[in-house]
Structures are given as C-alpha cells and as structure tokens.
Image (spheres, helix red, strand yellow):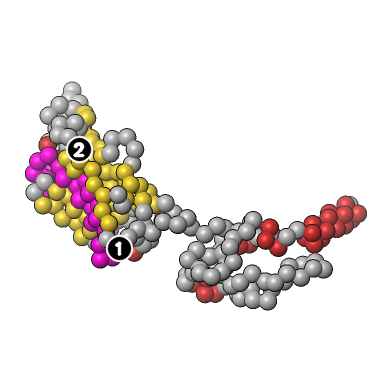
Amino acid sequence: MRASIGLATLLLVIAGCSASPDAAAPNQVATPAMGSPEAKASPSVKGAQEPGPSKKPPASRGSNRPGDKGGAKPTSGQSPSPAKGTSAPAVASASRADPSGDADGSEDPPPYTDIRAAALRGEGGALTLTLRVDGPIERSLAEGTDMTVNFRLDRKRGRDHQIYAIGTSQGWRADLDNSGSFPGRFTISNDRFVFELPWKRLGGASRLRWETETAWTKAPSGPLGQTEFAFDRVPEHEPAIYPE
C-alpha cells in the first residue's frame, strides 16, 4: 500500500517538475473580477515560483483577469479574457416592428396583447425598453384575467435577465429576475409599456441578444367554459441583437 502511494507521489512530483507553469493553473480559473472584495482580499502572487529545479519568472499580478491592461496573455490552463466587443457603446439602440393581428390564441383577445413594435435604448447609464401594442392598455384587468409582458436579455458574458410586468385586477407590477421588486421606473402610457433601469443593475452596459413577448389568459366564465388565451412574440424566431 505504502509502495503504491509512494509511486503515485513520485509520479506527481515528476509531472510537476516537467509541466509548464502555464499549464498548471486550475487555481486561476476562478480568479475574482478586478475590484471585487474577493480580489482585494486575495494574497499577492508576486515572487511566486513553480516547483521543480528550473525557475520561471512569476506571472504579473492580475495578468489573467478581465479588464487588465499590460498583463501577460492567457496561456493554457488560464481563464481567457472576455472577447472584444462585449461592451456596448454609451448611446445605442435596437428595435423591431411587428404586424397587426398576428397574436396567437383565442379569437378576439384584447388588442393590447398584440405587439406592434419593441425597442431598446441605452443612454446616460440607463437602459430603456419600450413595448408598443395594438391598443390602449387597461390599468386594471377584469377579474380572472392575467397578463404578462416580458423582455428577456441574454448577455454575451455574465448573468441573463428577465424584465417583466404582471397585470391583474389589482393593477400592474414590474419585476426584475423574480426578485419581488423593480430597481427602476415602470410606466404605462396609452399603448406603451416602458421599463427604465440603470445598466449597473444588469451588470453594466453590454452587447446582448433580446426578445419580448406578451401572454394573456382569462379564466372560464362557467363550469363548462374554457380558458381563453393569447400571446405574441418579437422577434418570432431568433432573438435580436443589441445594439444594431
């Protein structure tokens, strides 16, 4: 038993001596982002050396962290830096139009279930999402009726987000990622739903893929009735790109 353990240890030592320092970086994969509490608390790697008889100059501090400038390029075993172009310009926009009368579901749903246009605009550190529908929006829906308006944002890197509003007989309520609150402003103006929130609540201004949809349901009016429903989506097939 001890002999086998000793042999295994010897093989590991030999492998450690012959392997390149750049290839032995499992501890660098989870390097915290620059400026985070974890990054500030991380011990300095200045002067660190690889095991083995041959000595290599230590990697520069933070050389494999996103956003660092002048550091060494990532090598095998290190987390690559984010691809160029993941940040969005300070002022940018994207939009999609949708024809009238293409909502799916039951016959004669309310016109505000049918999307006519959707737009995203980033400016001044904030992102505004606007959804225009095919008729005036009711401030409170009929009893037994529910509706959801949803924007899905898929970031190139980082967390994806859901920005939505739910309408009932009690009125409308906006939410971000099912958190129970909305860190911005939500308004309804005639035939428009408008969400506005700081980019920092979404991880910063970023290029992303997006889509929006409406979903409306009405409970049966009697024991023999059927649930009515309607939904619409823009774009219909593949998510759109922000910015255009």
Q: x, y percentage for residue 121?
A: 24, 55
The picture quadrant where one finds residue 204 is bottom left
**Helix, strand or loop status at disc 1:** loop
- Asked whether residue 128 is drawn in magenta, I would say yes
Any mark on residue 143, and which? none
Identify the mark nearer the N-term, 1 or 2. 1
In the rendered image, is residue 17 in sight? yes
What residue range appears in magenta? 118-141
**Please, which residue is most extreme toward the top here?**
224
Left or right, residue 220 beside residue 241: left
Task: Please name the residue that numbered disc 2 is placed on.
Answer: 98
State the CA–CA distance, disc 1 to disc 2: 27 Å
Any mark on residue 90, and which? 1
Q: Dot 1, how many residues are within 10 Å of its Cα: few (below 14), some (14-19), or many (20+)?
A: few
The picture quadrant where one finds residue 14 is bottom right
The residue under the point 20% across, 37% down is 98
The residue under the point 8% across, 49% down is 190
> Compared to 207, does 63 lie above or below?
below
Q: x, y percentage for residue 103?
A: 20, 32
Which of the two discs, 1 and 2, sits closer to the camera?
1
> Amino acid type of disc 2?
Asp
Left or right, residue 162 beside residue 101: right
In the rendered image, is residue 146 in sight? no
Q: x, y percentage for residue 78?
A: 61, 59
User: Viewer-proximal residue, 133 or 156?
Assistant: 156
User: Viewer-proximal residue, 221 or 195?
Assistant: 195
> Amino acid type of disc 1?
Ala
- Asked whether residue 203 is drawn in magenta, I would say no
**Helix, strand or loop status at disc 2:** loop
The residue under the point 42% across, 51% down is 156
